[in-house]
Amino acid sequence: MGNLDIMPWRSRRQIALGLLLAVLLGAVIAYDRCHAGGFMIPHQTAKGLGMANALTAGVDDPSAVYYNPAALREVDGNVLLLNGSYINVINSVENRAREARNLHDDNFLAALFVNYHLPGSNVTFGLGAYTPFGLATTYEAGFARFAAQRTELRTLYVTPAFSWSPFKQLSIGAGASFVHATGLFSRALCFDPITGCTAPIGLEGRMRITDTTHAFAYNLGILFKPVDRIKLGFSYRSRTDLRFREARVKLEGAFSIAATSAEVRPLPLPPVIDLGVFWQITPFLGAEFVYEHVRWEEFARFGATFSPRPRFLGAPVAGFSLPQEWKSTSVFRLGAFYKLTAAWEIRAGITLDETPIPERRLNPAIPGADILTLNAGVGYHVGRISVDVGYMAALYKTRRARNVELEGIPATGIPFLGVPGRDKFTTFNNFVALSLSYAF
């Protein structure tokens, strides 16, 4: 760390400014081709947020439990890391000059990571508690009267992991996750395809589904260092099916019963593959490029079966089924850091993230679009304590859906009617993260 003062301050500042300008220039050039989406929350630390989550090969703190368990060996000592994230979601849906804005703007998440090097061995253990998937949208009545009104998915992963280094250049790792999840789906219903429920003749209802479930997942990682300044990383996070088998259903309107239960079609949390290349360009400057593949194509349909079946104006309602037909996506991440002094480090990054939601299935519950992110961060290290701050601006392309039903065409069951016309989706996200770590 003493070598950091060899380079004059002016030269270091010029290199740092050049790095930041290069990242921002790359973002501007790539904007028209940027691609994001689904309900994945990839950033788990302030450092990860500041570097656009480009940490598959270069991660060097206990969040390797999530990013790449093989990299647990790269942590200097035993470290406890706490992270808090604030997510500001600003999105609206407009149709024929009528607009509905998401009321669930503010979201807070926390994560914890810790590692421990087993003395006298090449084995390192880690433990993490974090939220890699989630969703929260709420719309007031009005435009969204017969579309999704409130949709929430909350997950918590608790993951013990380990890494083992058979020799200096290679490390392998794995983790097993216990997943706790809660879900909520609420919307109003229209059973009048002729007038769209504009006439007060009682062909309206309301449905609210809630449940809690548990599942299991795993992740694998490999880290290879062909030379001292280059690291190659691979990680795989498995698919997890959330099975809400006994969901509680509350019904309002002209239903025969006020409550029933439902078996919800398994909701897949998709598998994720990351490939990263880290380059320590100089003793002060490092950068990583990550390619990420997310198999969203496994989310083909969302639906539920009611038991016992309620009746609406005398007709039995078996349930509902909404096609999703998502596609797998590619994500490109570029992040870099520069050490100003032994204590201070600055970071920057960009992400090009492709939405998995096809135009014909776009709906207010998950208003996805292609995204460009601009990321920045700073870290301060003194003694055993480190403090990191990260920020990300997620710039969504404005999107127009041409489907005449906001939720798509149902295959069976309840007709989910929307407002005919072209729907305009506008979204912008702010992410802020603060991490505190202590080496023991």
Image (cartoon, rainbow, N blue to C red):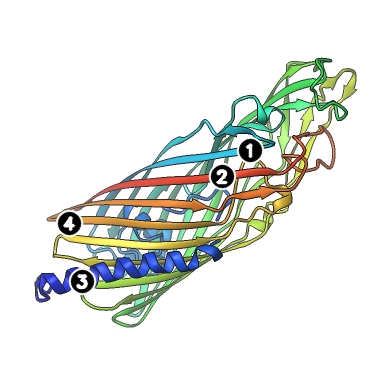
Marks 1 & 3, CB-CB < 8 Å contact: no
Q: Of circles 4 and 3, which is in front?
A: 3
Q: Which mark is residue 138?
A: none
> Mark 1: which amino acid?
Glu
Q: How many marks?
A: 4
> Mark 3: which amino acid?
Gln
> Mark 4: which amino acid?
His
Q: Is residue 251 visible?
A: yes
Residue tagged 3: 14
Check the picture and name the quadrant holding the N terminus.
Answer: bottom left
Place residue 73 in its image quadrant. bottom left
**Could you tell me which residue is drawn at 52 percent across and 30 percent down?**
103
Q: Which mark is residue 381?
A: 4
Q: CA distance from mark 4 to mark 3?
A: 22 Å
Residue tagged 1: 94
**Could you tell me which residue is drawn at 17 percent across and 65 percent down?**
340
